[in-house]
Image: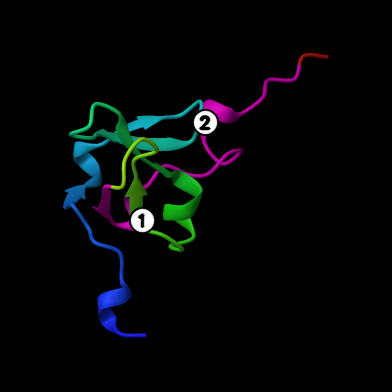
Amino acid sequence: MSDDDEPAIYDEVEIEDMTFDAARGLYHHPCPCGDRFEIALEDLLDESNDIAVCPSCSLMIRVIYDVENLPKGPGNGPASETLVVA
């Protein structure tokens, strides 16, 4: 296999230009096809993937981000804390 086997990237997008859906744990960005590129926060946090894909077409984008600036995963942030009433 050669370096040419790496997927073709349509664009590189700063994470600040993406929208975060906290309910689904996904970042998304508009795709030219009319759908949207999506990438899971979990993938970004463990640095296993920086490629957002569009589920409707073959386009992919590389997400430019700093892991220290990402929101914490499920159960680690104030929005996900549970109030216990006795």
Give the side of residue 85 with respect to residue 23, left or right: right
Observer-side mark, 1 or 2, equals 1
The x, y position of residue 43, in whole percent, is 47, 53
Queried whether the magenta region covers residue 66, the answer comes back as yes
Q: Where is residue 6 drawn, in percent x and y?
A: 31, 71
Q: Position of residue 66 (x, y in %)?
A: 29, 57
15 in relation to 45, above or below: above
Task: Give the residue at mark 1.
Answer: 68
Q: For this rendering, which residue is in front, 55 or 16?
A: 55
Q: Furthest residue to the top?
A: 85
Q: According to the image, label 2 marks what residue?
A: 78
Give the amino acid at mark 2. Pro
Res 40 seen here = yes
Asked if disc 1 and disc 2 are in contact, CB closer than 8 Å, the reply is no
Q: Which residues are magenta?
A: 59-84
Q: Earlier in the sequence, mark 1 or mark 2?
A: 1
